[in-house]
Each structure stands twice: as structure tokens, then as C-alpha cells.
Image: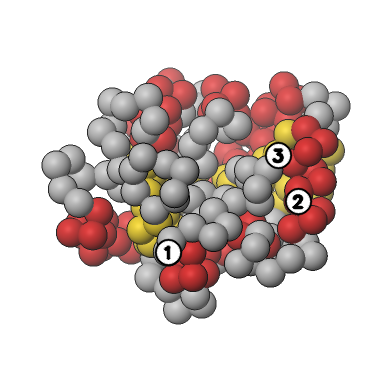
Amino acid sequence: MNVIEYPDQDMLAIDVANRLAGDLKTHLLNHDTASLAVAGGTTPAPIFDDLCAADVDWSRIRVMATDERWVASNSERSNARMISKRLLVNRASAARFLPFHVPDRDPEDVIAEVEAMIAPELPISVLLLGMGADMHTASLFPGVLGLEKALNPSATPLTILRPDSQPEARISLSARVLDAAISKHLVIYGEDKRKALEKALLLPPEQAPINAVLSETTVHWAP
């Protein structure tokens, strides 16, 4: 794990966007396509505002969320909605998005179909993660129903999780798939999350799921 510190969040966003674009370009030098898995929520949005204009052959990029709430794609709680609005615009509108949510069906009924869709894009070429103060990443929350399966070294690519604190199920890339990404970046803001990350390093993944994916990860931190 390598930690890069920035004086402010604006400089972090610009630098991380440049690094992600560079990683994608490097991967495309030797591959027909590249896969980009990104976190949802508010943390990556400013990065997307810069990344979407990057001079990358976006037509060869496959974009997916690291996890998704089981809600309609037009819901304000949908990661797909945020990714579409903030990343898949400008030059990046040429990228192909791989949605996890399937309307009007239960996650258990379609997870195999979604896994078949993303399988050709694995291992992930470039990964952008966030982390909560509780040390979760993607939808891998401490104590959540489904976490043990998601952390299993032989886990399937996707796992269904049902947080008690959330009204809907979530579907998430498993720890195995996240950790196997070729280029991994984690973005965190503030002293609280910096301390949470330091704490996570001393705990097992069952208590601090982020610790399952930190190997060779570049951590980007700003106040």
C-alpha cells in the first residue's frame, strides 16, 4: 500500500483522474479493451468530472460500478445514475457501461446473467474504490449478511448483500475480484477516514473489509 497526500480535494481529483486515464491508456497498449470499475457515492464524483474529458479511446473502455443498490437506474440512490451523469459524458460517453441492476427482477434470479456479462472484462484493469468510516468498501460492510461469502478466496465475482441499515439489497464485486484488479486506487477524505484506514490495517477483513483489498493499492488522501 502506498499513500499519496494532497493539500486539498481539488488537487486530488485532478491527479487521480490523470492517473486513472494513464492506467487505462497503458492497459490499452497491450489489450483490445480495458475495464474500469468505480465506486459510487459522493467521493468519486469530482474525479469523474475531470476523467470524463481525458484523451482516452473510450470506445474500448468497459465501465462498471463496484457495487449497486437494487434500485431503478433513475433512482437518486443508484450508482449507475451517478456514474452516467458524472462520468459517462464528454469523451467518456463513448464507453460501454455494464449495469448490475436488472429491472423488475430479484437479484438472486439474475446474478448469474450479470456475472456472465462482466466475466470477459475480468480481471478489472483499473479500480477506483472509496471507504466508509466503518471501514467498508463497495458494499462489503462489517457484519453484513453475505460478507463471509464475499470475502471467501473462491467467491464468485458478484455477491448479494443485505445491510440491516438499508432498505434494499445490494450487489457487489467480491473481495477476490476487487483485490485482483491490475491497477487499484483508493480515495479517502478527512482525518476520520485516515484514522479508520490505519485502524483497518490492524484488523481482519471480517471486521474491516477494506483490508481485503489493500495489497498494492495506491491510497489518495486529502483533508
Nearest-to-viewer mark from 1 and 3: 1
Question: Please, what is the three-letter code of the amino acid marked with disc 2?
Answer: Leu
What kind of element bears circle 1? loop
Question: Please, what is the three-letter code of the amino acid marked with disc 3?
Answer: Ile
Nearest-to-viewer mark from 3 and 2: 2
Q: Which residue is mark 2?
A: 197
C-alpha distance separating marks 2 and 1: 22 Å
Task: Examine the rendering and report whether any part of residue 211 can be seen.
Answer: yes
Residue sitting farthest toward the front:
164
The answer to which of 93 and 39 lies nearer the viewer is: 39
Q: Is residue 89 above or below residue 39?
A: above
| Residue 125 located left or right of residue 47 | left
Where residue 146 is drawn, which disc sits there?
1
| Residue 111 located left or right of residue 198 | left
Label 3 CA crowd tier, 10 Å (few <14, some 14–19, many 20+)? many
Q: Which residue is mark 3?
A: 188
Task: Examine the rendering and report whether any part of residue 98 can be seen.
Answer: no
Nearest to N terminus: mark 3 or mark 2? 3
> How far across and how far down the image is residue 190, in percent?
78, 33
Q: Is residue 139 above or below residue 72?
A: below
The answer to which of 221 and 132 lies nearer the viewer is: 132
